[in-house]
Image (tube, rainbow, N blue to C red):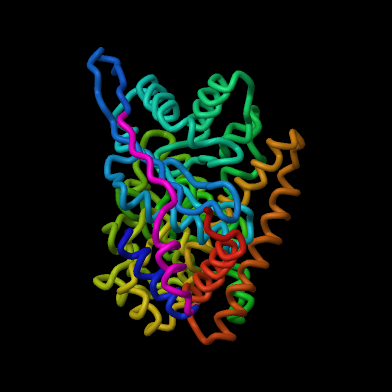
Amino acid sequence: MWEMALSRLDATMAILGLNDGMQKYLREPRKIIEVAIPVKMDSSIIEIFKGYRVQHDTNRGPAKGGIRYHQDVTLDEIKALAMLMTWKCAVVGIPFGGAKGGVIVDPTKISINELEKITRRYIFEIIENIGPEKDIPAPDVGTNAQVMAWILDTYSMDKGHSVPGVVTGKPICLGGSQGREEATSRGCVYTILSTLKVLGIDAACLNVVVQGFGNVGSNAAKILFDLGHRIIGLSDVTGAIHNPGGIDPYKVADYIKSGKTLASYPEAQAIGREAIFEIKCDILVPAALENQITASNAAKIKAKIIAEGANGPVTPDADPILAGSNIFIIPDVLCNAGGVTVSYFEWVQGNLAYFWGKREVNLKLRDIMEKAFYDVYNASQKKKVDMRTAASLIAVDRVAEAVTLRGIYP
């Protein structure tokens, strides 16, 4: 993923004509932190977990980015995701730079007590490098509001007073924002609705396929379902299902909560996980992990629009294949920026100790996402480039401008 991020950045900087010094600057993270996390497990055996925090850029404001708990976490992945956060914050115009964190652990295979110990020790190890004016973590794959609550408490205990602005994605009762849980999904839907307008597609009842039924995918499916669209395909780590007549995502969510798997859902046909990409549909929302749509399966996709709910779901070698099929792509730095946007709202609310209602949060999110969409779309039309390139040009140019204005110290 790091190679992919650098490849796309290099192409963007070449179009912008940035000088060699600026190109070198934007390619390198400002800070890379690697820590060993010793934890006394429930069995009394001491295990050592590896953790990372990468701050890619802080010229436009404090670093911002989630913390990922996954067994396949690598430093290169975290570097790439931190860089992606830099562009994401810039493209929607919020005053943050990009960061990302990760711990190499499978959270499904440890106890809640062990998870808390890992979280608190990880934060202790990086505590001098985070804070509301430095670097603000948030949830990502494998983490949630409870993990953010432990981070808030650990940091606050070290400082001797409550510091709600140190982390976003917190529980509401601890200063979290209304609407944060479904913010990434709602932002994704706002960009889809804007796409339908510019493409002149009748939005009455469209067929939607969602790959990944985690927080982003499930909420996107629910919001689109509530708007009257037909969800015809869903997938998660257990498998995939298809029903041309439609699937109720609320029923699927309840079915999974009962301890059963999505693949065994009785009101749809079970299909192979890769077959989810072959379903003919109007909108495909890849909302799982990165590198899901590649040169090997891109030609099989039969969607009119791809809305990248996940980070980096489409590889660079797949982009020209999708373009050849006239598929309109809403790139990740735009499409899934709703999460960091509402995280910004939460940070502002926490620092001011003044909280907004859900309706106000959603309206503010809609305004920012729609403005960002039309900025990117208009740039793509003016420069005659695809949406991904247009979004990258806007984001990288904004960061480069900030670097130029601030200068290099000393």
Q: Is residue 309 above or below residue 392?
A: above
In the rendered image of this protein, does residue 120 appear above or below residue 311?
above
Q: Would you say residue 225 is visible in this rendering? A: no
Residue visible at 74% across and 48% down in the picture? 359
Q: Quadrant of residue 275?
A: bottom left
Residue 384 on the magenta span: no
Which of the two residues, 172 or 233, is positioned nearer the viewer here?
172
| Residue drawn at (53%, 62%) of the image | 335
x 38%, y 19%: residue: 113
The image position of residue 214, as x and y in percent, is: 43, 47
Specify whether residue 349 is in view.
yes
Range covered by the magenta-colored residues: 17-36
Residue 105 location in percent, x, y? 30, 35
Q: Quadrant of residue 232?
A: bottom left
- Residue 21, magenta (yes or no): yes
Image location of residue 6, percent across then percent down? 36, 65
Position of residue 384 in the picture relative to residue 362 (left or right): left
